[in-house]
Image (cartoon, helix red, strand yellow):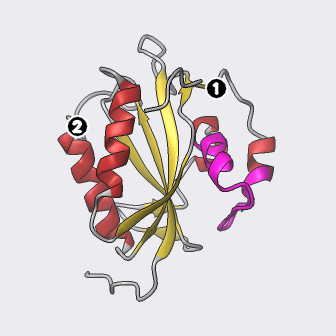
Amino acid sequence: MPQPQPLEPVLAYIGFGGNLGDPVERLKAARREVAAIPGVRETAFSSLYHSAPMGPQDQPEYVNAAMAIRTTLAPLELLRELQAVEARFGRVRGVGERWGPRTLDLDLLLYGQQALECDRLAVPHPGLAEREFVLYPLLEIAPGLEVPGLGPLAELARHCPLRGLTRIEEEHHG
C-alpha cells in the first residue's frame, strides 16, 4: 500500500556497518551515496567505531557509524533506497548466515518520533537498545534524542556496556 509523501522533512537516523574489504573507505563512500539520494539531506555523521561481531566471532571486526538525515521520503521508500545502496556495494540479502560478515549494512534506526512495524520494516530498529555499536555513534550525534517507546538515548547507552567498542582515531582529514 503506497504511503503518502510527508509534507515536512522528517529527522531520521541510519546505522552503518560492515566488515569486509576496506570497511572504513566503504562506509565513507556509502555515506556519500546516502547523502546523494533525492529527498535526503545529511545533517550529522558520527565518528567511525570498531566493534566486535555480533554473531560468529571468526570474522573481522566491524566498522560502524550513525548518520542523521532530514528526508521527505516515506519510511518504506527510504528503506528501498538504502537497500539499493547496499546492493551497489555488493550486499546480497537473504544469502549467508545471520550476523555473518557483510560488505555494507544500512539500517533505518529511527524515523521521526514514529513507531512503525510491518513485514519489511520496524522502527525504532529492533535491538537498538542493546547494541553498543548503534547506541554510542547515535549518542555522539544526537545526545538529547528520545527514542519512541524506549526513552532517552543517553539513558539507554548508560545501561549498555561498551563490549570493546572503540572510536577510530582518524590519522588524516581528507
Q: Which mark is residue 165?
A: 1
Q: Residue at x 47, y 28 (%)?
A: 63
Q: Residue at x 61, y 39 (%)?
A: 131
Is 140 a magenta residue?
yes
Q: Residues within 10 Å of mark 2 (few under 14, many from 20)?
A: some
Q: Quadrant of residue 89?
A: top left
Is 50 a magenta residue?
no
Q: Quadrant of residue 100?
A: top left
Q: Amino acid at mark 2?
A: Phe
Tell me where residue 19 appears, x and y as whole percent: 39, 24
Q: Which mark is residue 89?
A: 2
Q: Which mark is residue 99?
A: none
Secondary structure under the numbered disc 2 in the rendered image? loop
Q: Is residue 84 above or below residue 12?
A: above
Q: Quadrant of residue 108?
A: bottom left
* Magenta residues, start to end: 134-154
Q: Is residue 149 left or right of residue 44?
A: right
Q: Amino acid at mark 1?
A: Leu
Q: Residue at x 61, y 49 (%)?
A: 138
Tell me where residue 166 appears, x and y as whole percent: 64, 24
Label 2 – label 1 distance at C-alpha: 24 Å
